[in-house]
Image: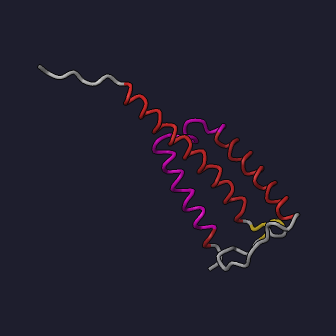
Amino acid sequence: MPGVYLAAILASATGVLLIDRRWRLTAWRAPGRTAAAVLIGTAFFLAWDAVGIATGVFVKGGSPLLLGLDLAPHLPVEEPVFLAFLCYLALVAAAGAERLLTRGRTDAAAPASEEVR
């Protein structure tokens, strides 16, 4: 079934986007910085892939789940979509973890309620 892998990436990205929107973690808090981080990260990992492909370390396997369209030899069209998703997921996960840790510290620092005597 060609395209299943791309559909799974896009469905996962939609879930992460909904989480981000609900708690305003990255894209809804700083859209420009989020876009820049995702683009820079994706470009970095595409360069990494190019080096891996050129040295023969990375090769595209034959999977019926891929669309079958290549941007370059051994670079399926799904790869940059996955890399952008990976970068966005990392941003949302880091922002979520930071928020949880910050909330934990502020909860612990809050004074305990006094007992009623």
The verdict on residue 105 being magenta is no
The one of 10 and 116 positioned closer to us in this rendering: 116
What residue is shown at x 63% (from left), y 55% (from top)? 85
Quarter occupied by residue 81: bottom right
* Image-based side of 17 in relation to 75, left or right: left
Residue at the outermost left position: 117
What residue is shown at x 66% (from left), y 60% (from top)? 82
Where is 32 relative to 76, above or below? above
* Image-based side of 16 in relation to 71, left or right: left
| Colour style of the rendered protein structure | secondary structure
Majority secondary structure in the magenta region: helix
What residue is shown at x 51% (from left), y 46% (from top)? 20
* Image-based side of 65 in relation to 102, left or right: right
Quarter occupied by residue 35: top right
* Image-based side of 18 in relation to 112, left or right: right
Position of residue 97 measured from the top left corner of the image (x, y, whole percent) = 51, 42
Q: Quadrant of the C terminus?
A: top left
Position of residue 46 measured from the top left corner of the image (x, y, whole percent) = 78, 56
Q: Quadrant of the N terminus?
A: bottom right
The magenta stretch is 6-33
What residue is shown at x 59% (from left), y 67% (from top)? 7
